[in-house]
Image (spheres, coloured by chain):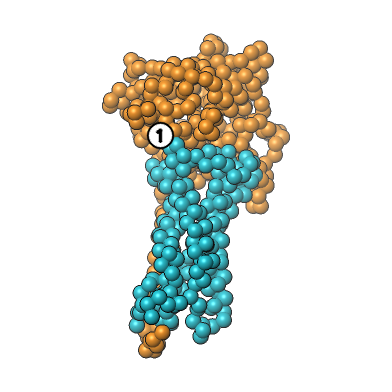
Chain colours: A orange, B cyan
Amino acid sequence: MHASPPLSGRSVVQRLALIGLVLLILVLSFGYVGGWLTPHRLTAQQLVNQLQANAGGTFPGYRRNHAKGVCVAGYFDSNGQAQAYSIAQVFMPGRTPVMGRFAIPGGNPYAPDGSAPIRSLALRFTQANGQQWRTGMNSMPVFLVATPQAFYEFLQAQQPDPSTGKPNPAKMGAFFAAHPETAAFLAWVKTARPSASFATESYWSLNAFVFVDANGQKHAVRWRVVPQTSGTSTGASDADYLDADLTRRLAQGPLRWHLVFTLANPGDPTNDATKAWPSDRREIDAGTLVLTGTEAQESGACRDINYDPTILPHGIEISDDPLLPARSAAYATSYLRRTSEEAHLPGIATATTEPETQP
Amino acid sequence: MTRSSTQFVLAARVLHWLMAVMIVSMLFIGVGMVASVSERHEWLLAIHKPLGIAILVLAIVRLVVRLRNPPPPLPEDLPAVQKLAAYASHYLLYALMLAMPLVGWAMLSAGGYPVMLSHSLRLPPIFPVNAAAFAILRHTHAWLAVLLFLTFLAHLGAALYHGLIRRDGVLSSMTGVRHDLD
């Protein structure tokens, strides 16, 4: 090896400074990408923190939204009708096991069932090839807002005022005035009543997705499940009637829904969950969802499932709907928090499997 | 002297620089995707998983290359504490290159997620479904990523120190450039 001429003390300092600068730029870039230098950029952590604030606190071990719910199990009997549009194995004629969860919105697992007119149904289909289809559906045809930022602003407006324990009407009014896209949801909510049963509701995907067929052709779709059980009664004053109703119905036999896909026409919006597609769009009844049993969520098999709607089998893909990545990110954050609580990790609130007594 | 013991073998150098790009990209992808709620979240996640498995495979190949081709010795006049730091950081980098993808894979397995490398390619689970294990593995993945980033910074800083200040042939043993910067 040749000997290098010695560096002057000044050169050494300059070169050390250069090395330090390179490292500093890397650290700052890492921090920027990680969002630490841009606290106003919306993150999943902020969304979940706001959900916790709106719930009036943290309920260890529970989901940060749709916290109150119940596990259900069953299967999907495909009739093969959707096969022409998607190569997903779940749509081949035959049966796919399903693990699901009914819930009501909000972050409080002890909220009364009548507190909101919305019910939700999350499903995980496990295909024979090991791929999964997870979906989280709600009992309304359109969503409140079209973007994660608008949803965050809604949650901020909805945060209970400490003096009244209820959302501040002025803030809510200002939010709706600034967000005319909420009109379709508000029109729906005016007529909606908290149903007495999970079994009598339809549940919509809200977001658009993309089917991929055997030729690689893509088809924008939305879906819903339509109950074979009819009923329009409104829930009683009891806080927990939904669970009791479901248990009673399932004791008498399975509950069934049609799984119906709506195919978009060219130009139908796929990136805006506040806009329903026209009612004349082509529909496919892909088969029957059959739910046969229920378990408490504190110990049931749905407890540890993150119903992230972007977990999809080959043949179904996400659309350009901006809510989908945000749902995925926020659900992952909620899942990490509640599983950390289940694991009793240090510095994290502890989960109990026993329902707490609420004041 | 064209093929000397002062240089890493070609395979080692190619693997080093290829994996350097992949691993640094991976660190930025990982920290970016967990902070994002935009469509970036989805496409970064779609890159993260196959890239992680590619790093795991290359790390195994690299370990074999390393064991079959011992690296050039460090300069004899390098202080003992710096030699120790060099060896320790290299062991740590190899350990993390192998551990990070395995912890990520195990974490998804424990969470009950299908480990999808593409729309259709699924890896089998390597850990039983267990929520508490998921949480521990998920936190471990994040802390090991921080450790890997810090080790990378130390490694880069040391390489530049050798190349710009000590000018002792250590940097050129990996760049393949025969003469260090004067």
Q: Residues within 10 Å of mark 1 (few under 14, many from 20)?
A: many
Image-quadrant location for residue A263: top left
Q: Is residue A213 above or below residue A12?
A: above
Residue A119 makes an appearance in the image: yes
Residue lying at the far top of the rendered structure: A230
Where does residue A305 sit, x and y in percent of width and height?
58, 35
| Quadrant placement of the N terminus of chain A | bottom left
Q: Secondary structure at mark 1?
A: strand
A262 or A117: nearer the viewer: A262
Which amino acid, mark 1? Ile
Residue A153 makes an appearance in the image: no
Image-quadrant location for residue A218: top left
Give the residue drawn at x 28%, y 26%. A267
- In this rendering, the count of numbered labels is 1
Residue A259 in the figure: left or right of residue A277: right
Give the residue drawn at x 49%, y 81%. B75
| Quadrant placement of the C terminus of chain A | top right
Q: Is residue B136 above or below residue B160?
A: above
According to the picture, the residue beneath numbered tag 1 turns out to be A318
Q: Chain of mark 1?
A: A
Give the residue drawn at x 42%, y 71%. B174
